[in-house]
DNA sequence: GAGGCGTTTTGAA
DNA sequence: TTCAAAACGCCTC
């Protein structure tokens, strides 16, 4: 694929945003804090130098990442490239984008929102497949009974982010 | 409170 | 096409 990977420095480390011609395709958490997987190596641009539009998206994404990491309301996001995702995943991720900062919903509740009340487990799978955590706030989804559930970048990040948002 | 089972979706063989 | 796995929820003991 023709993608560009650009660093987003924050007080918590360097996030890595990956872009296609259509928009932001993925966001990697800072190396060292990410759970297994091996992503998050040093950022490098693949292919051509970043086009002007990608630089524009990157500045938007950088602002959004820093705001989200600080638990503040998210400024406008660049276009997100969800090509390759299933309709179910897109429905789940769209619903996630509507959750305001500081508020959490249960997997089962999210399942009802998208019209699949029995799909709580599938919602969890879709959250786990989310390539853009933080900006698509899967950390605001928790299991029933107040349990945390899981998080692709590690539960420590989930707790940290929820704590900061609750503090706002 | 703990354990087991059911539901739904995804990805690999 | 089939099967196993998964960031869950509900029911039973």
Image: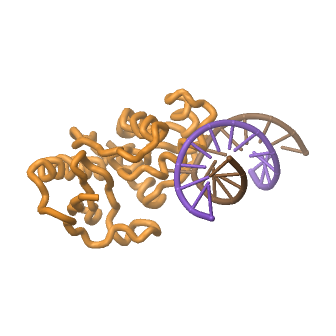
Chain colours: A orange, B purple, C brown
Q: Residue furthest left?
A: A52
| Residue A4 position in % (x across, y down) | 21, 60
Q: Is residue A145 visible?
A: no
Residue A17, how many percent across, how many down? 26, 57
Q: Quadrant of residue A97?
A: top left
Quadrant of the image containing the N terminus of chain A? bottom left
**Quarter of the rendering containing residue C3:** bottom right
Residue sitting at x 46%, y 69%: A36
| Residue A116 sits above or below residue A149 on the image | above
Q: Which one is in front, A55 or A101? A: A55
- Kindly identify the residue that appears in the image at 38 percent across and 51 percent down: A133
Quarter occupied by residue A75: top left
In this picture, residue A88 sits left or right of residue A19: right
- The residue lying at 35 percent from left, 51 percent from top is A132
Picture quarter with the C terminus of chain A = top left
Name above or below for residue C12 compared with residue A45: above
Would residue A38 be seen by someone viewing this image from the given angle? Answer: yes
């Amino acid at each position: 694929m023709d993608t560009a990977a650009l660093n987003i420095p924050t007080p918590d480390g360097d996030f890595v945003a990956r872009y296609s011609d259509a928009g932001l395709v993925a966001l990697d958490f800072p190396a060292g804090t990410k759970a297994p997987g091996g992503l998050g190596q040093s950022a490098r641009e693949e292919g051509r130098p970043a086009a002007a539009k990608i630089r524009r998206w990157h500045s938007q994404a950088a602002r959004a990442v820093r705001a989200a990491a600080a638990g503040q309301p998210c400024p406008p996001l660049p276009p997100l490239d969800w090509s390759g995702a299933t309709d179910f995943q897109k429905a789940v991720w769209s619903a996630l984008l509507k959750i305001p900062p500081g508020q959490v919903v249960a997997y089962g509740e999210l399942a009802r929102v998208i019209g699949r009340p029995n799909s709580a487990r599938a919602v969890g799978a879709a959250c786990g497949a989310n390539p853009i955590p933080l900006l698509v706030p899967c950390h605001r989804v928790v299991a029933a009974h107040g349990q945390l559930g899981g998080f692709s970048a590690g539960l420590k990040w989930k707790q940290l982010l929820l704590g900061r948002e609750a503090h706002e």
